[in-house]
Every structure is written in C-alpha cells, then in structure tokens.
Amino acid sequence: MTSFTSLISRQKTLGAILLFAICAVCLPAQASAAPAELDDLIAKTQASFNKTKTLTADFTQETVNKGFGRVTKSNGRLYLLKPAMMRWEYETPKGLLLLIDGKKLWYYDPEDNTAYFDKLEGYLHPKSPAMFLAGEEPLTSLFTIELAPTSKEDKLDTRAMKLTPKEPQPGVRAMLLKVDAKTYTIRELIVVDHLGNRNRLMFSNVRQPDRIDPDFFKFNIPEGASARAMPNPGIK
C-alpha cells in the first residue's frame, strides 16, 4: 500500500505545478546580475507560459524526505490543458495516476486499488503557487523572484530563477524554476518545503500539440476500485 507520506509528497507537487518542484533555498541569488537581465528573463518566461495552451512532456521525479533520509524516484508522462487540467501518468510506479479535471483532483493508486479525490479550489486559490502553471496568475504577482545560478553543464542551455511565495504556503518554502534558454519553456522545477524536503521534476521531450481532447482529463474509477476523500487537504 502506498504510504501516507508518499501520497502527501505527490500532493505537494501540485502546489508547484505542472506540473508541474527547489533546492534554490540553498542557492544564492546572483547579486551581480543587472536588474534588466532578471526583468528580461521574467518577461520572456511569462510570455512563453501565456502562449502555452497545451503541453506534453516526459518527466522524472525525485523526492527527498529530509527527516527519514529517503529518496524516491519515479517517472512518467505529463499532459496539460489550460485552464487547470493536468494528467500525470506514471510509468514508475506503474499505473499510478494524478489527474486534475478542472474541478477535482484525483490520485489513483493501483497497488491498493484506491482513487483519492479532493476539490480543486483549495489547491488553486488566488495566491497558490500552482496558479502560474494553471495559467491564472503572472509570476510576479505570486512570487518574489531572483536570478539563480545554473551548473556548468546547464549554463548554455537553461536559465534559472528562485521563486519565493509572497504569501506563506504550507507546502512551499521556495521553488527553483529552470527554463530553456532559447524557448523559455519549462525544463526543471524543484520545490522545497519548510522542513527541507525536496520534490524535483525534470522535463524532456516537451511539446505543445495543437489540441488535447478535454475528455482525456476525465477520471473514470477503475472497476472494483474504492473512492475516498483525500486524507490530507494538501496545499491550501
């Protein structure tokens, strides 16, 4: 049976985004960077988000539980349709599904054949970090933004920002957002909570198809599965 900690960890992924996860808490901002450089990065990233109506991508997820010293790795495929529709299909663990249908959040665990659900409003309240991925709020209204350094390997390919929520969020202390240096599409997202736990999402094969059928985001409870309210309200 999937552990309660694992379930809550994946709920916290939604709070960041596309979703949508930051060791930026440990990374200093580049104080020497000119304000114009940051303004340019924010503007181009926001423009990329604004024009993105659909998105598909492969993802790799790494969750670090600081208290237990445990690292959990998983991977799968993400589908996004604005506004507020997401589908996270996991290959590892096989069959696990995280879905937002515009009104509800669904989490299906095939191991215990249980579908958990919750209303979406609490996750997408006006100042939730998830709002920028849902296409509802600009980055600058939700976050204090600083330039963040990138590794030598990433320097030519990505640009990075540290995002700190302007309003306190239970599951998000800070986020590190990396975007493609040419297209400004999302490449990596890391979320750090107040306990130091990290949820890292890396994206590849990012595409923006002309259309994704909204019916693809409808959740059908598998035969024989039980449905239960989410055991934790998640990020409110």
Image (tube, grey):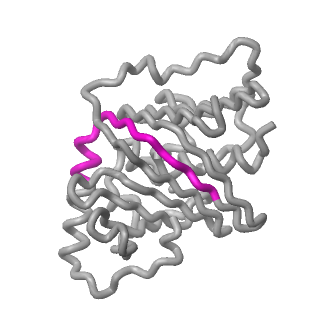
202 left or right of 5? left
Q: Residue at x 40, y 40 (%)?
A: 57
**Residue 56 lies in quadrant:** top left
Q: Is residue 65 visible?
A: yes
Compared with 22, 121 (above or below) is: above
39 left or right of 65? left
Residue 223 in the image: state x and y as whole percent.
71, 12
Is residue 90 one of those drawn in magenta?
no
152 left or right of 128? left
Residue 17 in the image: state x and y as whole percent.
47, 48
Residue 11 in the image: state x and y as whole percent.
62, 45
Camera-nearest residue between 24 and 43: 24
Q: Is residue 128 visible?
A: no
Q: In the image as oriented, which residue stretches furthest toward the front?
A: 153
**Residue 208 lies in quadrant:** top left
Q: In the image as oriented, which residue stretches furthest toward the right?
A: 1
Is residue 62 one of those drawn in magenta?
yes
Question: Which span is picked out in magenta?
Answer: 46-63
Compared with 2, 126 (above or below) is: below
Q: In the image as oriented, which residue stretches furthest toward the top?
A: 223
Q: Residue at x 36, y 42 (%)?
A: 205
67 left or right of 207? right
Q: How many marks?
A: 0
**Residue 156 lies in quadrant:** bottom left
Q: Quadrant of the N terminus?
A: top right
Compared with 115, 152 (above or below) is: below
Residue 124 in the image: state x and y as whole percent.
49, 43
Q: Residue at x 47, y 24 (%)?
A: 217
